[in-house]
Image: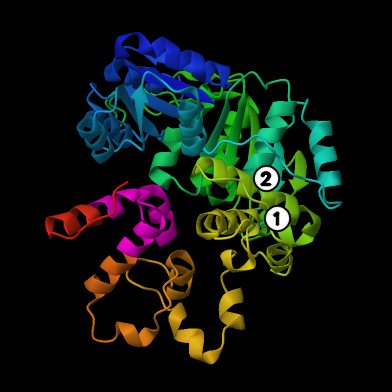
Amino acid sequence: MRLMIIGQLEGYISAAGKIALQRGAKVIHCEDADQALGALRNGKGADLVMIDVKQKIGEFITALKTERIHVPVVACGIGSDARSAVKAIQEGAKEYIPLPPDAELIAAVIEAVTEESNSMIAGDPAMKPVVAMADKIAPSEATVLITGESGTGKEVMSRYIHRKSKRLNGPFIAVNCAAIPENLLESELFGHEKGAFTGAVGRRLGKFEEANGGTLLLDEVSEMHPLLQAKLLRAIQEREITRIGSNDAVKIDVRIIATSNRNLEESVNKGEFREDLYFRLNVVNIRLPSLRERKTDLAQLSQFFIDKFSEQNGMDRKKISAEAAAKIAAHHWRGNIRELENTMHRAVLVSMQDEIEADAVHIAGMASAQASPAATPTNAPDPAGVSSADSSKAVQNTGGVEALVGRTIADVEREMILNTLDHCLGNRTHAANILGISIRTLRNKLTQYRDEGISVPEA
């Protein structure tokens, strides 16, 4: 994990940096936001930015968005100045860390914001030959194509191969080809010169140059436009790229890992994907089985996510009950590991027992199939973004649909939000997760209620 720290912070900067280093992070220090922007443009990538509240956080985050530099930002400052913390959050920072630094707090924020995990659970017989293949080809320089359904852990496997390779000390850079608009992806990959197009306020190195000496992951490469596929093919063949607005070729040394949830052979036959690029990427193919093909990993994966989200939310760790485990084993898991992860996150937040009980494991589709006809209406979405059935588990609200008749949507929404917040003992983050809304939306609602003279549970 690469951490960029911006500002002086009256000497506490070195302490924060040392804590991050002890946690395995690579630390870059910049004097101010302008220097940080210059470093990011020139390939000094970061997975997380910690910035002094005295810096112009709003302008810095706006500049990142303008130049399409995607990196989470947390603010930090001396003491616990509530006003400065609120201002930083309003300007776009994800969290506020008071200084002097607390080792556990910094470690928790780094893990929560980056959501970086180096663990791979693969004990099922269906996964053993997959891992064996990954171990065998990882030390080579071969291009790897990882295929499988959405949510099967293709990026996790990519990181695993990188860590087992000879390039493990180099950067691992991931680009989601499906999430970046076609007209911006070329600049994201190959970089651009100042003035190359509107908004190019300075030279910026692309992901190929940022990944130099390491591994470049092209996630969902099948979504790339055919015209850009030709330029990618040349970069892989010639091991050089040309920035937009430049005529000079730049030599690169990267290993390519690509992923796709499509059948690329079918895409080639339909003319949607270049055949020559497919052969270049498909030197080694690793297919990840779906979660329903690796049922014996379910229990361990579930417990892994329970432990992860319990620590992340400052809650006691729990074991999963036999009833909950049986409920999980019976599900089809169409969304694979990603669906399981989200399900266990919610279970951790709403569980009321010493173990994760079956009622806390809310699985979309399963509850409605098992519900009685009389209970069916309570599954309709409420204004706060969660179902009434879900919210009853969260806040123990036993009222029926009849109690809602004649009330305004705003009134029902307010009661849901305040009851959930009260259930969470005032913890805004937990309440927002249960309600399925952002922490910023929750704060805005609470401010509105205070202005209306309504009592709001304290944090």
Q: Is residue 215 visible?
A: yes
Residue 286, horizontal then vertical, whole percent:
76, 45
Residue 436, horizontal then vertical, whole percent:
41, 59
Residue 10 against residue 398 in the figure, above or below = above
Q: Residue at x 49, y 38 (%)?
A: 112
Which class describes the residues within 10 Å of circle 2: few (<14), some (14-19), or many (20+)? some
Residue holding disc 1 = 265
Residue at the front extreme?
A: 354
**340 sits to left or right of 178:** right
Q: Confirm or deny contact between disc 2 and disc 1 (CB under 8 A).
A: yes
Tell me if residue 327 is in the magenta stretch. no
Q: Residue at x 13, y 59 (%)?
A: 453
Residue holding disc 2 = 278
Q: Main secondary structure of the magenta part?
A: helix
Which class describes the residues within 10 Å of circle 1: few (<14), some (14-19), or many (20+)? some
Residue 194, horizontal then vertical, whole percent:
30, 23
Callout 2 amino acid: Tyr
The first of marks 2 and 1 along the sequence is: 1
Q: Is residue 280 visible?
A: no
Residue 243 against residue 176 in the figure, above or below = above
Q: Residue at x 40, y 29 (%)?
A: 244
Residue 288 against residue 20 in the figure, above or below = below
Callout 1 amino acid: Glu
The magenta stretch is: 418-444
